[in-house]
Image (cartoon, rainbow, N blue to C red):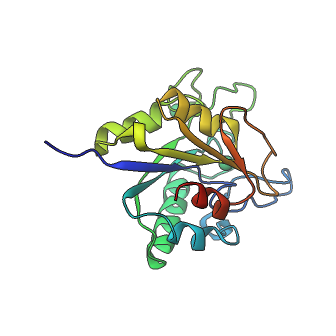
Amino acid sequence: MTVKQSAIFLDRDGTINTMPAYADAAFDSPRVPADFVFIDGVVEALQQLDPRYALFVVTNQPGVAYGKIAHEGIVVATNDLMTRQLKQFGVIITDVATCLHSDNRARVVNHNYYHPACGCRKPAPGLVLQLAQKHNLDLSNSWVIGDRVKDVAAGQAAGINNLIIVNYEFSANEVCSFAKNVASMKEAVNLLR
Ligand SMILES: [Mg+2]
Ligand SMILES: [Zn+2]
C-alpha cells in the first residue's frame, strides 16, 4: 500500500513574492520574470518547514487574459524562475499549478482565456484536486497558506481543514473566519510545528 504524502499548498503572489507596482496598478502579479522578488523572510521560513510535507504552488494568473502579461510562456517562465531559485536555497517545490482563466468578461482582452466557470480558478478547488490526484496527496493532513480568502476557500472546498492566511503590505488585508490569520510566513510555519 502506498502511503499518501502530506502537502502544503502555497499561493504565489503576495504570499511567496511581492506584488510590484505598475503604472495602472499599485500591486499586481509580476508581468515579467525580472519583477519576481521574494518577500523578506519567506525563503528562510520555508527552509524551516518539516520535510515530511511536499510543497506545491497554486496560482491564479489572469494577467494574460487581461493583456497585462504578454503570453502564457511568461507565466511559465516566472514559475520556473521561482522554483529554480527556491531550489538553490534548498526549498523544493514539487509542482506548480496555474489557472490562466478569468470570468470577468469586461476585463478580458484575450478571449482564449475567458471562462465563466473553469473550476480551476481559486476559490474553486480544481488545482488542488488535480495536484492531489497526480501526486497521491493526503489532503486530511495537508495545509493551505495564502494571502487571500479565495486561496483558503479553494483548500476548504477540496477538503483541507488546515488553512492559514498571511497578511503582507501588498495583500488585501483580508481576514478569514475559517482560517488562522497571521502576519508572516514565519508565523505560518511556526503553526505547522
Ligand atoms: Mg496572492
Ligand atoms: Zn481556470
- Position in image of residue 144 (x %, y %): 54, 45
**Viewed as shown, does residue 114 lie left or right of 134?**
right
Q: What residue do we see at 70% from left, 72% from top? A: 40
Is 57 placed above or below 85 here?
Answer: above
Residue closest to the eye, 20 or 167: 167
**Extreme residue in the left direction:** 1
Q: Is residue 112 visible?
A: no
Which residue lies at the image location 66% right of the left edge and 60% below the top edge? 187
Q: Residue at x 71, y 60 (%)?
A: 184
Question: Vertically, is 168 above or below 130?
Answer: below
Q: Quadrant of the N terminus?
A: top left
- Looking at this view, is 16 or 44 the one in front? 44
| Residue 179 visible somewhere in the drawing | yes
Depth check, front residue: 21 or 157: 157
Q: Position of residue 102 (x, y in %)?
A: 63, 32
Q: How many marks?
A: 0
Residue drawn at x 82%, y 57% is: 169
Residue 61 quadrant: top right
Instruction: Tell which residue pokes out farthest to the top in this image.
Output: 116
